Amino acid sequence: MKLSDSIEISARPETVFSWFTNLDRNYREWHPDHRDSYWLKGDSLSPGSVLYAEEYLHGKLHKLRYQMTEVLPNRHARFRILGAIGLLVPRGEFRVEPTETGARFTATLYPRCGRLLRLLMPGRVQALITHQEEEGRNLKKLLESGD
């Protein structure tokens, strides 16, 4: 199972991907539940870089670490989620694909035992899905407004 959300953005794929290369600076404006982020290792989207981030999910503050594992500029960034939450959701990716009018941005998380998680923690899984959808809409708004 995977949790995935896609959205069309009227911006060039390079513009969308570039926004993520500055994720440490852009993180707080991406979603109102995002609190802080900075690079623990490296300084951008490159394999081996580690981003620290704090955000509220299902009403609780989570302190997360994401290690970039594979980056294809202007196309995708894959990452591992480190620490305890990584036991439940070990990896994810951001994908940017060109379209006739701009780009399609897709965020995907790959939880372990996804069906079991939905059964045991349906509220938390739904909160994560909602958060992902809000991030997509917010990214679209940010990039299309030119701010």
Image (tube, rainbow, N blue to C red):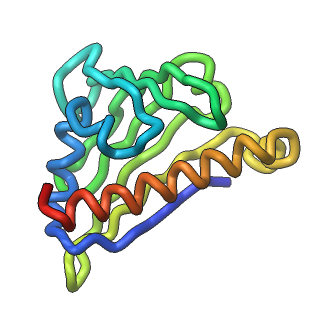
Residue at position x 41%, y 59% in the image: 136
Q: How many marks?
A: 0
Q: Residue furthest bottom?
A: 100
Residue at position x 54%, y 46% in the image: 109
Give residue 95's position: percent from left, percent from top: 34, 57
- In the image, residue 123 above or below residue 53: below
Give residue 22's position: percent from left, percent from top: 18, 37
| Quadrant of the image occupied by residue 9 | bottom left
Q: Quadrant of the N terminus?
A: bottom right
Q: Residue furthest right?
A: 119
Residue at position x 29%, y 14% in the image: 40
- In the image, residue 51 above or below residue 111: above
| Quadrant of the image occupied by residue 52 | top left
Q: Quadrant of the C terminus?
A: bottom left
Give residue 144's position: percent from left, percent from top: 20, 67
- In the image, residue 45 above or below residue 118: above
Along the line of sight, which residue is nearer the eye, 42 or 125?
A: 125
Q: Is residue 74 left or right of residue 96?
A: left
Give residue 54's position: percent from left, percent from top: 44, 24
Q: Is residue 133 left or right of residue 145?
A: right
Along the line of sight, which residue is nearer the eye, 37 or 88?
A: 37
- In the image, residue 134 above or below residue 42: below
Along the line of sight, which residue is nearer the eye, 17 or 78?
A: 17
Residue at position x 24%, y 39% in the image: 26
